[in-house]
Amino acid sequence: MTVLVVDDDPVQVELLTGFLKKQGVKVFSAPNGDEGLKIFLREPVRVVLLDQRMPGPSGDKVLKAMKEANPMARIIMVTAYADVHTAVGAMKDGADEFLEKPLDLKLLLEKINALDSDMGVDEDLLVVEDELERRPLPLKVIARSPAMQKVLSAVRRVSDTDWPVLIEGETGTGKEVMARLIHHLSSRRDHPFVDLNCAAIPENLFESELFGHEKGSFTGAVSDRKGRFELADGGSLFLDEIGEMPLLLQPKLLRVIQEGKISRVGSEKSLPVNVRLISATNKDLKQSADEGRFRQDLFYRVKVLEIKTPSLRERKEDIPDLVAFFVEKYGKGPVRMTPEAMDMLVKYPFPGNVRELEHVIQRTVTMVRSSLIRPSDLPEEIRHHSLTTQGSLTERLENLEKALIRASLTESNWVQTRAAERLGISERVLRYKMQKHNLSKEVS
């Protein structure tokens, strides 16, 4: 990593350069903005420590010039005259961090390392985006959130190797999409990607599915058949829910990983296979191994490299883009979501993750009567969740009352007499509560 220190105080420069060099950082220094900009344009600087007040061009002007030259560079503005206005101005001009003198060296190093890591993620994302533009995947990859951007960065790095990868994550988090992306970015991209859901194969057919069989090797084997390893030769084999693999079959998978050879059921002949293994699980595979339900040696073989897909709760920034994608995919025409409906979706925890969100949007755009999706068009579990899990008891009861009244009015086509009958209250009380909760057909 290369850091540039720009400060007119020679004592400060000596302190910072000496400290950073001891941490193994390559350091350039400059006594003013003009010299600093020359070094910045000449050298591959990743992080800049920029004093705000110096003779000649101010730190603000140098900051703008550096960001124009390389928007990817990370710049920490340093000042002895910190105030809110100054900090806000520096951030608007493109500063990534703002620190006040005297500097806490430990904090400074943490900031520099974090910014360097962020740059690495951004560089990986550019590679992934470029590849997806040239060779689009059948499924869209959405990664506005930092959590998902880090996953794509990891995917880019592991795709360069042939080592086995284990993708861990809750159900519906897109583990298969990540497996396909790893294959797509690898040197095996022009060879087969073969998948097998270990939870969907009967135990007595598992060996045949993986390794194939010879004609007559068992009842129903009327011809020779290639297994998934042979079909994936030269490419990638994706074993989804690998934790469901029968314990008796696991030594045979271990042997294939170690030796690169398979034997079909009913045959003593070994066949060489060249396959990159990608596995996925929604279980704690380490715990399964500790409890004897999964072989320890196989666990360490399939988990040479590891990627964890975040739950939708950990990547809420992606929900609006995911909603837009699914609305376009399943909508019969132009359909849009009201801000209130989107707010409900973002606040809902989605235990089924992206898959659940997809089904919610699919159902909603199918059933909605207009081109505008309102809160009342969303499934009941989403509408009622935010009402019963947030705020004080009084607020929750008020929200629940509002939701029940809105639901009754909707079911009664906003005929107040019918809605009051459904709720078991008088029409006068209903009108009072509608006014109290600001309920009308137009705003619902």
Image (cartoon, rainbow, N blue to C red):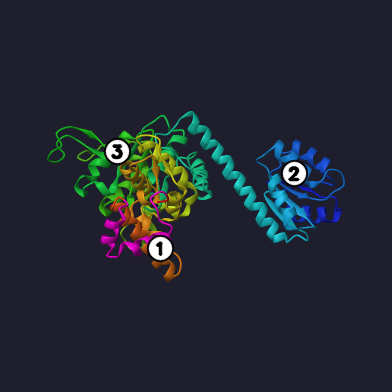
Vertical order, 80 against 241 (above or below): below
Q: Which amino acid does label 3 sit on?
A: Arg
Q: Nearer the viewer, residue 18 or 381?
A: 381
- Secondary structure beneath disc 2? helix
Q: Mark 1 points at which residue?
A: 399
Instruction: Return the x and y of residue 21 as percentages of the image width and height.
Output: 74, 52
Residue at 37% x, 60% y is: 431
- Secondary structure beneath disc 1? helix
Q: Name the residue under label 3.
A: 228
Residue at 48% x, 51% y is: 315
Q: Mark 2 points at which residue?
A: 63
Q: Please identify, in this view, whether the residue under mark 2 or under mark 1 is nearer the observer.
A: 1
Residue at 14% x, 34% y is: 222
Q: Residue furthest left?
A: 219
What stretch of residues is rendered in magenta? 414-442
Contact (CB < 8 A) between labels 3 and 2?
A: no
Instruction: Return the x and y of residue 275 as percentages of the image width and height.
Output: 38, 38
